Amino acid sequence: MTLPMNGSSYRIENMDILIKDFLNYLVVERGLSRNTIESYRFDLIDFFGFIKRRSDGIKDLKEVTRDQIRDYCADLDQRDLSDATVARRISSLRTFFKFLRTEGEFPGNPTAEVKSPKLWKRLPEVLSVEAVEKLLEAPDTETALGVRDKAILELLYGTGIRISELIALELHHINFEIGCVRIHGKGNRERMVPFGEVTSQHLKRYIEEVRSTFVKSPDEVNRVFVNRRGQSLTRQGAWKIIQKYATEAGLQVKVSPHMLRHSFATHLLERGADLRSVQLMLGHADIATTQIYTHINKDHLRSIYDQFHPRA
């Protein structure tokens, strides 16, 4: 810890150090992703800003009570933030105060009895198999960029990996012999994800025939997917690629990388894959997260009924 966790450590003036210590804990002890860490940082800075603006002159975190936390929740509500955002802010504070109490002499957790907004679970948006086919056929594979983009789309749908995992993929993570990619996912958990022959063909063509036209200095870039300048592809760049081809394919929905992940999982389950296998491929730590994909659309239920029920 940068600060000794004693009675003088919790002053508001030490905000930056307290946040830094907490974020270091999240990295070292919990192995959270960079994006998650940034969310915690933003939430805490917002809360400290609220405390500083208060008229009651709170100078020390030990002075924060349940009432101040509730006032903060009311402030969030007045800003017309979504229930999901409010719930995340409260969760960040709850984890932060729990950290202070565990690591030092902090007297309690003022968030303990504050309830988060109840969140309704929304079913993930998925593309039909036909819509996915249209999207995958959109790139012009007579061009170098089209070959690259085709490989990106095929890999995303063919493996269900996250966009952050795709752009972090390095050449030595791919094993064409067994048809698998090694993924370092959330919480630094490693998993092996299989891919099919079609994905293999397009990925191999990109790497062997096209990638070298973009990469200026092969020794400097190990990432599989690069941009026109030979630099590692960014998250924003990958998003634009997907949205471009969704428009060209005439799809009437806003297609995101995560929608391809949702579609991957849903289509596997609709065709009889077991939940545990899908969980492993997606890299979910808890199978409860995977269970959201067990929804099956009405058309699929109708076809199952018509196919198997004796009175259909």
Image (spheres, helix red, strand yellow):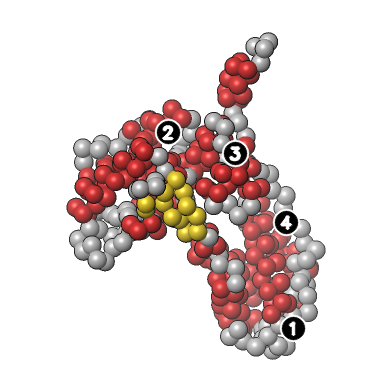
Identify the residue position indicated by label 3 in the image.
274
Q: Secondary structure at mark 2?
A: helix
Identify the residue position indicated by label 4 in the image.
116
Residue 148 or residue 312, whichever sits in front: 312
Q: Residue at x 54, y 52 (%)?
A: 283
Q: How far apart, in angstroms, are the residues tagged by discs 3 and 1?
A: 48 Å
Mark 4 burial class by Cα count in 10 Å: few <14, some 14-19, many 20+: some
Give the farthest residue toward the right: 113
- Lower sequence index among marks 2 and 4: 4
Is 47 located above or below residue 215 in the figure?
below
In the rendered image, residue 296, in percent from the top left (x then y), is placed at 60, 31
- Lower sequence index among marks 3 and 2: 2
Q: Secondary structure at mark 1?
A: loop
Instruction: Residue 123: tell me if it is visible.
Output: no
Identify the residue position indicated by label 1 in the image.
105
- Lower sequence index among marks 2 and 1: 1
Give the farthest residue toward the top: 311
Residue mark closest to the camera, 3 vs 1:
3
Q: How far apart, in angstroms, are the residues tagged by discs 2 and 1?
A: 55 Å
In the rendered image, residue 85, in percent from the top left (x then y), is placed at 62, 55
In the rendered image, residue 227, in percent from the top left (x then y), is placed at 28, 54
Contact flag, marks 3 and 1 (Cβ < 8 Å) = no
Q: Residue at x 67, y 12 (%)?
A: 310
- What amino acid is found at the position of numbered circle 1 in the picture? Glu
- Lower sequence index among marks 3 and 4: 4
Q: How far apart, in angstroms, are the residues tagged by discs 3 and 2?
A: 22 Å
Identify the residue position indicated by label 2 in the image.
132
